[in-house]
Image (tube, helix red, strand yellow):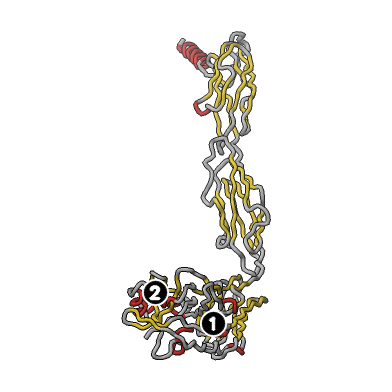
Amino acid sequence: MKAKTWIWLLAAAATVVCHSCDMTNSDDDNDDDPNATTLTVEPAAISAGATGGTYSLAVTCNTAWTASIDDGGAWSYLSEQSGNNSSDVIVTVANNTDFGHRSASITFSAGTLTYVVSVDQAPCDPLFTVDKNSLSFDGFGVCEGENFLYVEYNMEWTATLDAGSAGWCRVWPSEPRGSVPSGSTMTDYVYVEVDENSPVAARSGTLTFSAGTVSRAVLITQAAAIPYMELSPTSMTVASVASRYRVTTAGNVPWTAAVNSEAAGWCSLSINSGTGRDTVYFDVTTNPDNAIRTATIRFTADTLVRTLTVVQNGTPPLPTYASSTMTWVYGLSVWSDAIHIPECNKTDFAFSRTESQCRSFSWGWTFYYYNWPYVIQHQHTLCPAPWRVPTYGDLNGLRNATPNLRPILGDYGGYIDPETNTAKFYSTMAHFWSSTKAEDQWPFSDEADAANTALQLTYYMELGIEYAGMGAYDKSYGFRVRCVR
């Protein structure tokens, strides 16, 4: 009797366990029960591209059912979230603007049955394009075409020059670019500039664009420069007195320079070689003869030769003065009238380079203009003893004397401009040198300027009928002379 009881209990327990099982993605195997719940969904998985799309799911069910997407699937939508019996459900997957995969699950439920469909979407493809794969420049840095690149992108990017081009090539913008709104595509211009190349050889470099896993390379090439060299000026006419002058070189090749052997004794260079763009000073000694003399300074750069021709005026013979020199007393000094020469010749005109500058103005007066170095060199002849060239103090005393200055003024006239070598006539004033150098009171702070006599100044007087002023001016100008004793 006890054995029969245990067999009955085991059979009852097995029956209870079978009816409590959950059936996931199954329609139960109760084919024998026509009322049993059934649920299947086809297909069991959706694989979507980055651009998304719509996908159809076939639901087979014999009762009411529901469908839902988990929290990670906010980028996908169901056409139906519930239904009765069998039907189709459309799943809409949005465009993926991120650069990573994403996935979600759709759960269908009917009674105690559930069925899960997986959704997987590919990442957005990175986009970066450049409209050119090379840029070419000539030796002077001019691009053979447009010097910019047109880029299109949907993610942050950088532009980097290789080590071989970083020293002579520049890119703008150089900072990382991006900040692209999600799902957007942007465009931009990247400008490339290069320095002037040397004539030695062509050169090249690489500009690399990096955007995520995408890389684009642009080859930058530059031809060797054409050798060139220019001088400014290429000819000069200089005064007969010792002085310093300047010439500038412009070029892209090293150069050397030399004075022709015949002139090497009186013309010399401050430097005899350079790198291309330089300032060169040359000095001339006083020409002791009346005739002009010529020096040729030859600059050689690679296969190029440029010359500077220097013509130095001869020292003119000293004039013979008229015997009718008049004198006037102003303050404590006795002053002469104009240094007046009866006849005007080119050789009488210490500052002149052309006879036309030895001119007579409308009142019939003839004026003679001298640059300051000539005045100092010939001061004892221009103002024979006991006469002398006035000092700053002499002129300053005259400035404070009687306002009736017409006798010492003689007449108006102006001065000679050394840059144009022409007379600047003024109907109201004249200009007269003193023997006092301005730099004695105003020392130069720059040694090169102090050595350049063409830059040094001296005092002069600006004299009108009822006006007298003092100033300091370039020694190369042509002013008149009055003598004092």
Q: Identify the residue shown where x is 63% and y is 78%.
A: 307
Closer to the observer: label 1 or label 2? 2
Q: Identify the residue shown where x is 60% and y is 86%.
A: 292
Q: Identify the residue shown where x is 34% and y is 74%.
A: 402
Image coordinates of residue 416 in percent, x first then y, are 51, 74
Task: Give whichever of 108, 144 is nearer the camera.
Answer: 144
Which of the two labelled residues, at mark 1 and mark 2, occupies the earlier sequence position?
Answer: 1
Q: For numbered disc 1, what is the local secondary structure? A: loop
What residue type is disc 2 on? Answer: Leu
Asked if the residues shown at circle 1 and circle 2 are in contact, with their CB atoms under 8 angstroms apart, the answer is no
**Relative to residue 77, is residue 257 depicted above or below?**
below
What residue type is disc 1 on? Answer: Phe
Q: For numbered disc 2, what is the local secondary structure? A: loop
Task: Give whichever of 468, 321 is nearer the camera.
Answer: 321
- Left or right: residue 356 versus residue 333 is right
**Relative to residue 12, is residue 333 depicted above or below?**
below
Report if residue 165 is visible in the image. Answer: yes
Image coordinates of residue 225 in percent, x first then y, are 65, 67
Q: Quadrant of residue 34?
A: top right
Q: Quadrant of the C terminus?
A: bottom left
Residue underneath mark 2: 405
Report if residue 269 is visible in the image. Answer: no
Dot 1 crowding, Cα within 10 Å, few <14, some 14–19, many 20+: many
Residue 103's disc is: none
Furthest toward the left, the residue is 332
Q: Quadrant of residue 103?
A: top right
CA distance for labels 1 and 2: 25 Å
Furthest toward the top, the residue is 35
Residue underneath mark 1: 349
